[in-house]
Image (tube, rainbow, N blue to C red):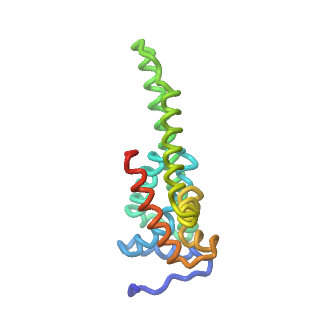
């Protein structure tokens, strides 16, 4: 245990996240690690619903978490919860990414029309995305049922480890172990995708 007082649990993760974010604003790296564990799942879930593309969602999630570290001092607990603040950052960043991608696509189409080139092949893009989804599905199928359930709840539904543990009626440590082992197996399986 660290030397800092235990975070309260009156309203679960909300109070803990609020207290951790205040500590992160003071440069506490351990608090950031804990906060990262609490918010990374919900951030990724929200970003994934907005952006839809897995790779882009992962990038945006990392950008949001980096921004969280850099701008934690801007958090004002009097204006709302830490989780709401973080999810607002995530939503804004995700919407910005979607707008940017659309604008880039429009620029490419206009340029292709001016140059007399064939337009962007959307069918090819959709086929490739479908193949990637199928590959991920196959890799998920290689996990144990318990690993697959934990990974799906955390990364696709946006639940925190603690929420996954509550939903599955399991100890938090068990869920963390399943997640670690499941993600390791997924990374090995998906190694050929990158």
Q: Is residue 136 something one can see in this rendering?
A: yes
Q: Give how far across and how far down residue 138 sits, in percent.
A: 52, 49
Q: Residue furthest top?
A: 116
User: Is 114 above or below relative to 164?
Assistant: above
User: Is 12 above or below relative to 76?
Assistant: below
Question: What residue is drawn where x is 45% and y is 50%?
Answer: 60
Please tell me which residue lies in front, 138 or 88.
138
Q: Is residue 84 something one can see in this rendering?
A: no
Question: What residue is drawn where x is 49% and y is 46%?
Answer: 135
User: Quick check: 28 left or right of 40?
Assistant: left
Question: What residue is drawn where x is 46% and y is 24%?
Answer: 120
Q: How many marks?
A: 0
Q: Give how far across and how far down residue 193 sits, in percent.
A: 40, 45
Looking at the figure, which quarter contains the C terminus?
A: top left
User: Is 110 above or below relative to 41?
Assistant: above
Q: Give how far across and how far down residue 174 sits, in percent.
A: 52, 76
User: Quick check: 134 left or right of 180?
Assistant: right
Please tell me which residue lies in front, 95 or 80.
95
Question: What residue is drawn where x is 45% and y is 17%?
Answer: 118
User: Quick check: 151 left or right of 58?
Assistant: right
């Amino acid at each position: 245990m660290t030397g800092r007082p235990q975070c309260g649990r009156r309203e679960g993760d909300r109070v803990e996240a609020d207290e951790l974010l205040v500590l992160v604003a003071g440069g506490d790296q351990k608090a950031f690690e804990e906060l990262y564990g609490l918010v990374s799942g919900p951030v990724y879930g929200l970003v994934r619903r907005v952006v839809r593309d897995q790779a882009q969602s992962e990038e945006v999630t990392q950008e949001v978490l980096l921004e969280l570290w850099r701008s934690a001092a801007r958090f004002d607990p009097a204006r709302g919860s830490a989780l709401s603040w973080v999810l607002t950052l995530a939503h804004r960043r995700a919407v910005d990414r979607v707008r940017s991608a659309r604008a880039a696509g429009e620029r490419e189409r206009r340029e292709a029309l001016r140059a007399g080139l064939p337009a962007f092949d959307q069918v090819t893009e959709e086929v490739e995305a479908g193949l990637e989804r199928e590959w991920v599905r196959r890799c998920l199928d290689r996990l144990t049922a318990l690993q697959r359930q934990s990974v799906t709840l955390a990364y696709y539904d946006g639940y925190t480890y603690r929420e996954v543990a509550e939903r599955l009626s399991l100890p938090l440590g068990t869920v963390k172990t399943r997640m670690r082992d499941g993600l390791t197996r997924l990374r090995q399986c998906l190694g050929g995708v990158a």
